[in-house]
Amino acid sequence: MYEESGCFDPSNMQQEGLIQAEDGFSQTHIPICNNQSFSMEEHSNYPQNPTQQDVAAAVLEMELQQQINLEMQQGETHLMQEIVHDSNWQEMSNFNGYINQFSLPDTPYPTTPDLLNMFPLPRCSPSTTSLLPNSSISFSKSAQKSSNFLASLGLLGDLTPVVADGASASASVVYDPLLPLNLPPQPPLLRELFHSFPHGGYALGGSRTSGSLFPGVVDERDVNGGDGRHFDNGVFHFTGDMDCIGKNRDGKGTKHLATEKLTRVLIKDKYTALRNLVPNPTKNDRASIVGDAIDYINELKRTVNELKVLVEKKRCSKERLKRAKREDDSMEGNIDTKSLDDMGQPYNGSSLRSSWLHRKSKNTEVDVRIVDDEVTVKLVQQKRINCLLFVSKVLDELQLDLHHVAGGLIGDYYSFLFNSKVCEGSIVYASAIANKLIEVVGKQYAAIPPTSSY
Amino acid sequence: MECVKTAFDDLCILDEEKTKGGRMEKRKHIDSDDEDDKFKSKNLEAERRRRKKLNDRLLELRSLMNKATIITDAVTYIEELQRHVKDLSDQLLKMDANCVKEEETTKIEETDAAEEMKKWGIEPEVRVTSIEGTKLWLKIVCQKTKGGFTKIMEAMSVLGFDLTDISVTTSKGAILVTSCVEGNQGGLPDVDQIKDFLSEIIKSI
């Protein structure tokens, strides 16, 4: 719909003017029209009455508003649309004059009109050119102030002297005043736009830029060779995707790439940090890192609970011992100690200690289950050396009373099951057992010569 | 009304008692107190709503997290848990250091074991049989002591046996070791020699 209203005004005069404009300004003018559709119309209206200009401006405003709503991400289009959008009529008409002068190739570049001198806007330095492709300027839909227009005026006002000076500087000029607007970056488009003037040709990428407005009118192959080169970087199609933002063909601005890379690296670092915390990490892919972390967190939670129970038990038994001693010393009846025991018992009984743990290492698998005072250890190890001796030593150290042992060689692995009881008052907990076992077995495996095999 | 009690464990005891009393009263009095019920159900509803609101908000917070924050939080949480574990285990060790009473229990256990064996007439025993080739079958009966099993295992490794399978049980103060081993390092000692060697070992247990 906006295509229709694009630069083709309902009024005949407008259309005439447009046709004029088209004739007058070959293809290069068309992209400008896209972005500065008002300019064409204004230009066409230039020789006409101010009233018509106003009408044109109104129409333009409407159409551009629509355009804004449709494609907020299209930089240059919106850039110029905003300019128009925020215009007030008075300024617009003045501006028209300026633009008309500006867009005519053969007119000498006008001196800055009074309008522009009215707006003390910051001029940017050429050094900002380099920043422009990276600047993430986004449109503020809500900013409907004339200040935007002022800024845009300033933009174009700056353009004049700069364009006269050199093409490259124009780009810098284009953006700096507009930065507060948060406009999306369209350096190549505008750059091309303003590059065109000093070159004396309007060889802006025709079909690419003007797609919707002038379908088929422009042939991008007609673009000047010199200017055509510029478009290789630019993405001129207004198809509503993000490609036009930035300068690279792949659709992402270099700044986007840089930030994304940075975030990727950061996230990867965090994954490796997580992996380093987990005791036996297997596989380096993210899914298993997270899976291992989950298991480890659960294991830690169980260990914490177990230790809490143990501490409580210990404290209780200590209390009981103390009281028992005191009772013995004072030779008071057993009733008191018994009652204390009774008090202690329910607590201990209700907090039945239970925990389990499963740990895997490179060549060993340990499963420790503790229920109250019974410890069951399952050990699976690769058959290379018989660690049974070392394991039983460890269990002795941990003061575990072996009740049953069963196991043997199964294929390539030794598998053992140990049933044992925790000695009264022992503070051993599942995690400690598992750690110790893995440590010892690991040591043995490390100690044997690598070539040994049965 | 049971569900009230289980569902709202975090309610203060006062509330529970109130509901309990309410239940009792209901049973006793036919004309139940509507006012109480109203307050109860209002409280219930209010509580339910409050917790639902909290849970929903927490879920939403969880859903908001992006990948980076999730991972960072996981790292922090793991470190915190590890610190907890360390603190608790240190605390436990400290507490344990103050208690010195295990030795007595050990001695008590051992004397008990010896007595029980005698009571049941179990005699220490070693049996070694050759099954086929280098395979041997062992049976050891001895008094159950701390570290006894370890000594037996030491002996077996000294003999250079490859364990095929093993079964150990303890009962009535005695320990029974049954094992099938493979003597793999040529120059297998004589069956009788093995038997003598092992008998010596168990005597020292």
Image: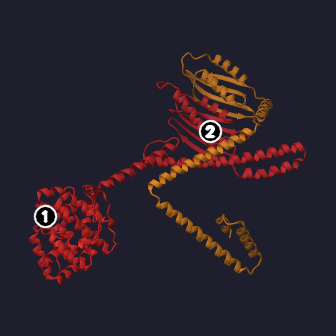
Residue A123, x across and y down, in percent = 27, 63
SS of the residue under disc 2 = helix
- The image quadrant that residue A377 belongs to is top right
Amino acid type of the residue that numbered disc 2 sits on in the rendered structure: Ile
Residue at horizontal 59%, vertical 38%?
A435
Residue at the disc numbered 2 = A433
Residue B142 against residue A166 in the figure, above or below: above
- Residue drawn at 62 percent across, 44 percent down: B86
Q: Is residue A235 visible?
A: no
Relative side of A318 to B62, left or right: right
The red-coloured chain is labelled A
Q: How is the image coloured?
A: by chain
Chain letter for the orange part: B
> Which chain does tag 1 point to?
A
In this view, the residue in front, A448 or A183, is A183
Q: Is residue A375 left or right of residue A17?
A: right
Say which mark, if any, is on residue A39: none
Say whether mark 1 and mark 2 are on the same chain.
Answer: yes
Q: Secondary structure at mark 1?
A: loop
- In the rendered image, residue B116, in percent from the top left (x then y), is placed at 79, 32
Q: Quadrant of the N terminus of chain A?
A: bottom left
Q: Nearer the viewer, residue A198 or A440?
A: A198
User: Residue A434 occupies which quadrant of the picture?
Assistant: top right
Residue A63 x/y as whole percent: 24, 76
**For the point 54% across and 48% down, which residue is it?**
B78
Q: Position of residue A310 (x, y in %)?
A: 69, 46
Subunit bearing disc 2: A
Q: Is A259 above or below relative to B87?
A: below
Q: Which mark is residue A202?
A: 1
Q: Which amino acid type is marked by label 1?
A: Tyr
